Amino acid sequence: MKAQVLIDMPENELNDLLIAEKDRLVKMKMSHAVSPMENPLQIKFTRKTIARVMTEISKRRNTSK
């Protein structure tokens, strides 16, 4: 997900996206533990997306103070 897309999102959508991505990561890890995924790099990309969303949220909190 591009950084510009995250910058344009309202804060409540960012929080919803963060929750959804964390749930997705947990499900992907569980399914990968049971049977190997076809593309395990999806786990890596999901972790990076979570980090990008969390960075944008913290950046907004720091600028609002």
Image (spheres, rainbow, N blue to C red):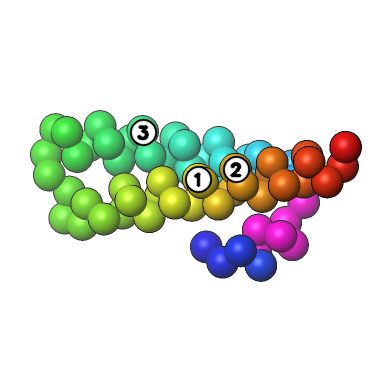
Q: Magenta: predominant secondary structure element? A: helix
Question: What amino acid type should be assigned to the residue bearing mark 1?
Answer: Ile
Is 31 contained in the magenta span? no
- The residues colored magenta run 5-10
Q: Is residue 65 left or right of residue 43?
A: right
Nearer the observer, 24 or 56: 56
Which disc number belongs to residue 50? 1
Q: What residue is pinned by disc 2?
A: 54
Residue at x-position 83% and y-position 46% = 63
Which disc number belongs to residue 26? 3
Q: Residues within 10 Å of mark 1 (few under 14, many from 20)?
A: some
Q: Are marks 1 and 2 in contact (CB under 8 Å)?
A: yes
Q: Is residue 10 left or right of residue 44?
A: right
Question: What amino acid type should be assigned to the residue bearing mark 2?
Answer: Met
Residue at x-position 33% and y-position 51% = 44
Question: What amino acid type should be assigned to the residue bearing mark 3?
Answer: Val
Q: Is residue 8 left or right of residue 26?
A: right
Is 7 contained in the magenta span? yes
Q: Position of residue 46 (x, y in %)?
A: 40, 49
Q: Real-space Cα distance between discs 1 and 3?
A: 12 Å
